[in-house]
Image: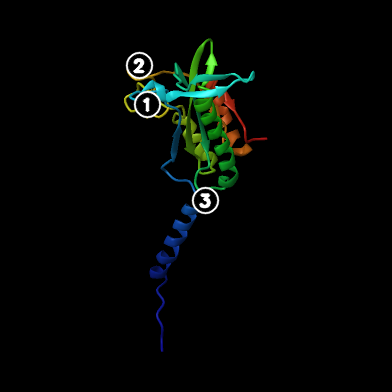
Amino acid sequence: MAREFHASAARPSLLVPLTLSLAAASGVTRNTLVLRRGGDSGQLTSTLDPSVFASVSVGPDGQVEEVDERCTFDGYVSLSHPMSLKSRDKFFSTGQLQQRSIEMMVDEINANRCGVGVDGRRYGLSLTTFGDDSSKAKVGAIVGNGMVPLSADAEDGDGVGLGAGPAGGGAEDVAASYWLGPYSSGLTGAMSPAANETGTVMVAGGAA
């Protein structure tokens, strides 16, 4: 029995899945995960009675004293960085250790230290993390398209950490902006030229 074989009909069915698998293997996506973390200095609790914020503390000399737990920020220091946020990213496991450490620092400074003090003023930290897909190309795109979070008075500001000032005080300004490097020397190296060109201070915590 003769069998017919049509090469032209069979070829597209072989090529299409191959093209799709190669595209998926890169791991780079058009959309970007963005995480924001900050601290509210009083707006969310402005309707509570002030007495609920008082707590008792024992000083070094053993004296019991009342401590006012309320904290007001005069502005915010913006920290922004790329990081591998998806479970399939090459540097996800180790990157998450670095990410969690940064988040713990931000929470400690905002919640327990009332921000950072500069010239008698208090500033909270606002952290914005951009998913980099463990890709140098993605890091370059993130930095090139504006990695610093929008100020609170921008039309489409996010309102997380930025602008969360005292009730009735209006939006707070970003006093300073800094970059944090992603995990791995390669990704940090892809980000460094932009830091040099823009004169932005970058702290590279996960690069050799």
| Residue drawn at point x = 57 percent, y = 28 percent | 193
The mark nearer the N terminus, 1 or 3, is 1
Quadrant of the snapshot with the C terminus: top right
Tell me the colour scheme of the image: rainbow
Q: Is residue 74 visible?
A: yes
Residue 42 x/y as whole percent: 40, 23
Residue 70 occupies quadrant = top left
**Res. 88 mark:** 3
| Residue drawn at point x = 41 percent, y = 42 percent | 31
| Residue drawn at point x = 53 percent, y = 34 percent | 103
Quadrant of the snapshot with the N terminus: bottom left
Q: According to the image, label 2 marks what residue? A: 169
Q: According to the image, label 1 marks what residue? A: 45
Q: Residue furthest top?
A: 119
The mark nearer the N terminus, 3 or 2, is 3
- Helix, strand or loop for disc 3: loop
